[in-house]
Amino acid sequence: MKKSIIALALFGAGMTQAHAQSNVTIYGIIDAGVTYVNNDSGNRTSVEAGQMQVSRWGFKGVEDLGGGVKARFGLEGTLLNDTGGAGVATGTPSSTSLFDREATVGLITNYGSIDIGRQNILGVQSVGMADPMGLAFAATSPNVLFSALNNSAVYGAFGSNNGGTALRENNSIRYVSPNFKGVGFALMRGFGEQPGDVHKSAYEGVSAFYHGGGPLSVGGAYARLKNNLGTDRLTSHAFGIKYIFPVVVLKSTYSENRLDSSRRKISVFGVGADFLVAPAVTLTAAFYNTKRSGDANDKSQQLIGIAKYAFSKRTSGYVSIGRATTDTVVTATQINLAQGFVAVGSDKANRATTGVIHYF
């Protein structure tokens, strides 16, 4: 009996130790704002989710396997908290995924990390850190729509996402190197999984970055994607730089993507700054210039100002004003370089937004 009790105690201790080596975190962002937009074609007032950051929820976990190796997973989905919905429809035919933002499992080692599943294209982390307004207003941001290939009407036929946008790739494998004195790189492949041609609907990407722990951060990314027929290719490259001063953060990005068949090029230049005017108050000013050339000529500009007040470490209020213009009046049949901002029938728009964002 004594031996049985000792064995049971040792087993329980082992279970406790194993449990201590792993953890699962539930997290998320709830962001809601009231937005007023004035277009030539009419005015609109609406409640919108995900203004400063896309509303989301997720699970992530890490388990220490010993010997410097860890297992990890990530599951993350979009929250449409203005209506109570969850997940964004993607694919052909279109369907809604619960974890549309990320669904991965992988390993972390001393030689780098590998993640497998649905995940962001390269450049979102390495270049996105320098986005002038911190990836706010994702539904209308030129860097999200065009630099990150998140416009389904323009990029839906390319990559392994089976339709929808190309911002995230299904069936993908990503490797991220260790950090060598602030310098690192990443490789990623998205498999189209179509028989007879490994290039159909494929994504291939590479990125490099410098985050040395000091004021300077630099990142760059390159990608090429094939369409679902394997007959056309989209190439993209982007760069970003951020420099942190004591009370000001300067950020700038440049990207362009080209289509082989029509020689269409869409480029985005962005520049902005964050000003810490008080311990709880941050002001942001951002400017974007978006240009289409090669098959057609068009330009659009956006100027955005944001003021944020931190009620706590997890909750902030914000107010924003913005203006967008296009070279020509937007029609329903053209690529709208100010999508979601300037409406069809207009060539300019003004926007005012106020809201609350909470992290959990």
Image (tube, rainbow, N blue to C red):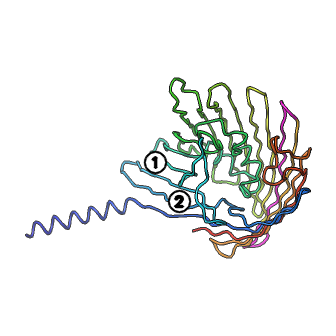
Determine which quarter of the picture holds residue 167.
top right
Q: Position of residue 115 (x, y in %)?
A: 49, 44
> Which amino acid does the dot numbered 2 rest on?
Gly
The CA span between labels 1 and 2 is 14 Å
Which residue is label 1 attached to?
105
Please tell me which residue lies in front, 183 or 104.
Answer: 104
> Which amino acid does the dot numbered 1 rest on?
Val
Q: In this picture, is 311 found above or below 289?
A: below
Q: Secondary structure at mark 2?
A: strand
Residue ranking furthest to the left:
1
Label 1 neighbourhood size at 10 Å, few (<14), some (14-19), many (20+)?
some
Q: Which residues are magenta?
A: 277-296
Determine which quarter of the picture holds residue 352.
bottom right
Q: Residue, x 11% and y 66% (percent of image)?
A: 4
Determine which quarter of the picture holds residue 317.
bottom right
Which residue is label 2 attached to?
58
Q: Main secondary structure of the magenta part?
A: strand
Please tell me which residue lies in front, 8 or 193.
Answer: 193
| In this picture, residue 23 sits left or right of residue 310 | left
Q: Secondary structure at mark 1?
A: strand
Quarter of the image containing the C terminus? Answer: bottom right
Asked if the stretch drawn in magenta spans residue 84, the answer is no
Label 2 neighbourhood size at 10 Å, few (<14), some (14-19), many (20+)?
some
Please tell me which residue lies in front, 276 or 339.
Answer: 339
Q: In this picture, is 164 found above or below 236?
A: below
| In this picture, residue 345 sits left or right of residue 214 | right
Please tell me which residue lies in front, 302 or 156.
Answer: 156
